[in-house]
Protein backbone atom coordinates (compact mmCIF):
# COMPACT_ATOMS: atom_id res chain seq x y z
CA UNK A 1 0.00 0.00 0.00
CA UNK A 2 1.19 3.49 -0.79
CA UNK A 3 1.64 6.14 1.91
CA UNK A 4 -1.53 7.79 0.57
CA UNK A 5 -3.58 4.59 0.89
CA UNK A 6 -2.31 3.84 4.40
CA UNK A 7 -2.95 7.39 5.59
CA UNK A 8 -6.42 7.44 4.04
CA UNK A 9 -7.44 4.09 5.55
CA UNK A 10 -6.36 5.05 9.07
CA UNK A 11 -7.85 8.54 8.67
CA UNK A 12 -11.22 7.04 7.77
CA UNK A 13 -10.98 4.52 10.63
CA UNK A 14 -10.30 7.37 13.07
CA UNK A 15 -13.36 9.23 11.80
CA UNK A 16 -15.57 6.12 12.06
CA UNK A 17 -14.48 5.52 15.64
CA UNK A 18 -15.28 9.15 16.48
CA UNK A 19 -18.81 8.48 15.20
CA UNK A 20 -19.00 5.32 17.35
CA UNK A 21 -17.84 7.23 20.42
CA UNK A 22 -20.33 10.06 19.88
CA UNK A 23 -23.15 7.55 19.34
CA UNK A 24 -22.09 5.77 22.54
CA UNK A 25 -22.15 9.04 24.48
CA UNK A 26 -25.65 9.77 23.19
CA UNK A 27 -26.72 6.23 24.10
CA UNK A 28 -25.35 6.62 27.63
CA UNK A 29 -27.06 10.00 28.03
CA UNK A 30 -30.42 8.68 26.85
CA UNK A 31 -30.43 5.17 28.32
CA UNK A 32 -27.87 5.25 31.10
CA UNK A 33 -26.04 2.27 29.53
CA UNK A 34 -22.43 3.22 30.34
CA UNK A 35 -20.69 0.08 29.06
CA UNK A 36 -21.17 1.23 25.48
CA UNK A 37 -18.95 4.29 26.17
CA UNK A 38 -16.25 2.08 27.67
CA UNK A 39 -16.25 -0.13 24.58
CA UNK A 40 -16.48 2.63 21.99
CA UNK A 41 -14.01 4.78 23.93
CA UNK A 42 -11.50 1.94 24.05
CA UNK A 43 -11.81 1.28 20.34
CA UNK A 44 -11.54 4.98 19.53
CA UNK A 45 -8.55 5.42 21.84
CA UNK A 46 -6.68 2.57 20.19
CA UNK A 47 -7.44 3.84 16.67
CA UNK A 48 -6.52 7.38 17.75
CA UNK A 49 -3.08 6.16 18.82
CA UNK A 50 -2.74 4.14 15.60
CA UNK A 51 -3.63 7.25 13.60
CA UNK A 52 -1.04 9.31 15.47
CA UNK A 53 1.64 6.67 14.81
CA UNK A 54 0.64 6.44 11.15
CA UNK A 55 0.63 10.22 10.73
CA UNK A 56 4.14 10.41 12.19
CA UNK A 57 5.40 7.59 9.97
CA UNK A 58 3.91 9.24 6.87
CA UNK A 59 5.32 12.62 7.97
CA UNK A 60 8.80 11.10 8.21
CA UNK A 61 8.48 9.30 4.88
CA UNK A 62 7.07 12.34 3.06
CA UNK A 63 9.52 14.69 4.83
CA UNK A 64 6.84 16.97 6.22
CA UNK A 65 8.00 19.78 8.45
CA UNK A 66 7.38 19.24 12.18
CA UNK A 67 4.47 21.70 12.28
CA UNK A 68 2.61 19.73 9.60
CA UNK A 69 3.24 16.47 11.47
CA UNK A 70 1.87 17.98 14.68
CA UNK A 71 -1.14 19.34 12.78
CA UNK A 72 -1.83 15.88 11.35
CA UNK A 73 -1.84 14.33 14.82
CA UNK A 74 -3.87 17.23 16.24
CA UNK A 75 -6.67 16.70 13.72
CA UNK A 76 -7.51 13.43 15.48
CA UNK A 77 -8.49 15.40 18.58
CA UNK A 78 -11.27 17.22 16.73
CA UNK A 79 -14.16 14.94 15.72
CA UNK A 80 -14.15 14.15 12.00
CA UNK A 81 -11.23 16.51 11.22
CA UNK A 82 -8.91 13.83 9.80
CA UNK A 83 -10.91 13.55 6.56
CA UNK A 84 -10.75 17.26 5.59
CA UNK A 85 -7.07 17.30 6.58
CA UNK A 86 -6.47 14.23 4.40
CA UNK A 87 -8.15 16.02 1.47
CA UNK A 88 -6.07 19.15 2.16
CA UNK A 89 -2.87 17.05 2.10
CA UNK A 90 -4.02 15.40 -1.13
CA UNK A 91 -4.71 18.74 -2.86
CA UNK A 92 -1.24 19.98 -1.94
CA UNK A 93 0.52 16.80 -3.09
CA UNK A 94 1.76 16.00 0.43
CA UNK A 95 0.76 12.34 0.06
CA UNK A 96 2.32 11.86 -3.38
CA UNK A 97 5.07 9.34 -3.88
CA UNK A 98 5.97 5.92 -2.66
CA UNK A 99 7.76 4.64 0.42
CA UNK A 100 11.40 5.78 0.55
CA UNK A 101 13.03 2.36 0.69
CA UNK A 102 16.06 3.21 -1.46
CA UNK A 103 18.74 5.84 -1.01
CA UNK A 104 18.45 8.76 -3.39
CA UNK A 105 20.70 11.66 -4.38
CA UNK A 106 19.05 13.78 -1.69
CA UNK A 107 21.73 14.78 0.86
CA UNK A 108 19.24 14.14 3.69
CA UNK A 109 19.43 10.43 2.84
CA UNK A 110 22.91 10.28 4.38
CA UNK A 111 21.76 10.56 8.00
CA UNK A 112 21.62 7.54 10.31
CA UNK A 113 17.93 8.30 10.89
CA UNK A 114 17.07 8.12 7.19
CA UNK A 115 19.08 4.91 6.88
CA UNK A 116 17.09 3.42 9.76
CA UNK A 117 13.78 4.56 8.23
CA UNK A 118 14.72 3.02 4.86
CA UNK A 119 15.70 -0.25 6.54
CA UNK A 120 12.43 -0.36 8.50
CA UNK A 121 10.39 0.43 5.38
CA UNK A 122 12.09 -2.45 3.58
CA UNK A 123 10.87 -4.73 6.42
CA UNK A 124 7.17 -3.77 6.59
CA UNK A 125 6.09 -6.71 8.77
CA UNK A 126 8.70 -5.84 11.36
CA UNK A 127 7.81 -2.15 11.17
CA UNK A 128 4.11 -2.95 11.47
CA UNK A 129 4.79 -5.16 14.47
CA UNK A 130 6.84 -2.45 16.15
CA UNK A 131 4.16 0.19 15.50
CA UNK A 132 1.38 -2.09 16.78
CA UNK A 133 3.44 -3.02 19.85
CA UNK A 134 4.15 0.65 20.57
CA UNK A 135 0.46 1.54 20.22
CA UNK A 136 -0.53 -1.34 22.52
CA UNK A 137 2.05 -0.32 25.14
CA UNK A 138 0.94 3.33 25.09
CA UNK A 139 -2.72 2.22 25.18
CA UNK A 140 -2.16 -0.05 28.19
CA UNK A 141 -0.12 2.58 30.05
CA UNK A 142 -2.87 5.16 29.46
CA UNK A 143 -5.50 2.69 30.69
CA UNK A 144 -3.48 2.04 33.83
CA UNK A 145 -2.77 5.71 34.51
CA UNK A 146 -6.03 7.37 33.43
CA UNK A 147 -8.41 4.44 33.68
CA UNK A 148 -10.81 3.13 31.08
CA UNK A 149 -12.98 5.52 29.05
CA UNK A 150 -16.14 6.53 30.81
CA UNK A 151 -14.84 5.69 34.29
Image: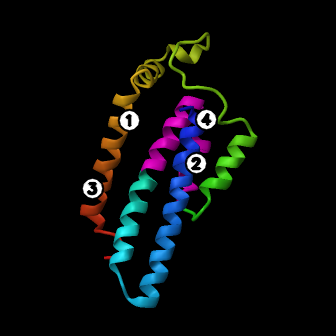
Q: Residues within 10 Å of mark 4 (few under 14, many from 20)?
A: some
- The image quadrant where one finds the C terminus is bottom left
Per the picture, the main secondary structure of the magenta-coloured stretch is helix
Residue topped by disc 1:
128
Q: Is residue 62 magenta?
A: yes
Residue for point 56% across, 53% down: 12
Q: Give left or right: position of 92 versus 16.
A: right
Task: Measure how far apart labels 2 and 3 are at the Cα level.
Answer: 23 Å
Tell me where the magenta segment starts and ends, as one range: 50-76
Residue topped by disc 2:
72
- x and y, in percent, of residue 95 in the image: 64, 36
Q: Give left or right: position of 55 versus 112.
A: right
Q: Residues within 10 Å of mark 2 (few under 14, many from 20)?
A: many
Secondary structure under tag 3 reads: helix
Labelled disc at residue 104: none
N-terminal-most mark, 1 or 3 = 1
Q: State yes or no: discs 2 and 3 in contact (Cβ < 8 Å).
A: no
| Camera-side mark, 1 or 4 | 1
Q: Residues within 10 Å of mark 3 (few under 14, many from 20)?
A: some
Determine whether 123 is above or below 23 in the image.
above
| Camera-side mark, 3 or 4 | 3
Labelled disc at residue 140: 3
Residue for point 50% across, 19% down: 101
Task: Measure how far apart labels 3 and 4 are at the Cα level.
Answer: 29 Å
Amino acid sequence: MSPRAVYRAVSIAETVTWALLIAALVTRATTGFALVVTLAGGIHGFVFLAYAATALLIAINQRWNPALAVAAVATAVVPFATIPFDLWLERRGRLDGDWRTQKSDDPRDNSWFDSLVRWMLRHPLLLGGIVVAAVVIVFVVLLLVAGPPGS
